Amino acid sequence: MTVIALRNATKRFPGTGGRPHTAVRDLTFEVEAGEFVAVVGPTGCGKSTTLSMVSGLDRPSEGSVKVGGREVGYVDAPYNDDDVRNAIAEVAGHHAIAEAMQFADHSEVELERLQQERRMEERRREN
């Protein structure tokens, strides 16, 4: 089952001299349920912009972004579904947050936090 699908997603921002700046150009990929995906690359290549489009914080200028089979429009649009919300996590890797931590460390911390949230939610449902 495809959880995330980008089709020809492009994101432009206002640039200098009236010319738009293209942060992401014609990006197409899918993430299947159960896959672990890391978005990596040099500064300025569009990683954060791509994640912002997937999360619903930004809309693509062209193309489409779907999460759980639904077009991403606004932050709350696709995330009312617990299965979709629990399938997506973003792990910050900025050096100012924890300079000594490597990607695996960040991932482990985030996975532990998600597991703790799920346990707390299960307890709430039981009571």
Image (cartoon, grey):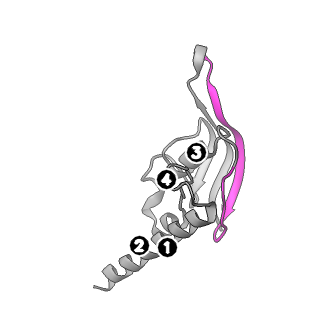
Question: Magenta segment: does it hold 36?
Answer: yes
Q: Is residue 83 left or right of residue 22?
A: left
User: Residue 117, labelled with which disc?
Assistant: 2
Instruction: Specify which label sits upstream in the sequence, 1 or 4.
Output: 4
Q: Nearer the viewer, mark 4 or mark 3?
A: 4
Q: Nearer the viewer, mark 4 or mark 2?
A: 4
User: Residue 112, labelled with which disc?
Assistant: 1
Q: Are marks 1 and 3 in contact (CB under 8 Å)?
A: no
Distance from label 1 to label 3 (Cα)? 23 Å
Q: Amino acid at mark 3?
A: Ser
Q: Amino acid at mark 1?
A: Glu
Packing grade of label 3 (10 A; few <14, some 14-19, many >=20) is some
Secondary structure at numbered mark 1:
helix
Q: Amino acid at mark 2?
A: Glu
Distance from label 2 to label 1 (Cα)? 9 Å
Report the residue marked by disc 3: 48
Instruction: Specify which label sits upstream in the sequence, 1 or 3.
Output: 3
Q: Are marks 2 and 1 in contact (CB under 8 Å)?
A: no
* Residue 127: percent from left, percent from top: 27, 85
Which residue is more in the foreground, 73 or 24? 24
* Residue 101: percent from left, percent from top: 57, 60
User: Residue 97, labelled with which disc?
Assistant: 4
Q: Nearer the viewer, mark 1 or mark 4?
A: 4
Q: Amino acid at mark 4?
A: Ile
Find the magenta span and give its range. Answer: 19-40
* Residue 84: percent from left, percent from top: 52, 65
Distance from label 1 to label 4 (Cα)? 17 Å
Distance from label 4 to label 2 (Cα)? 21 Å
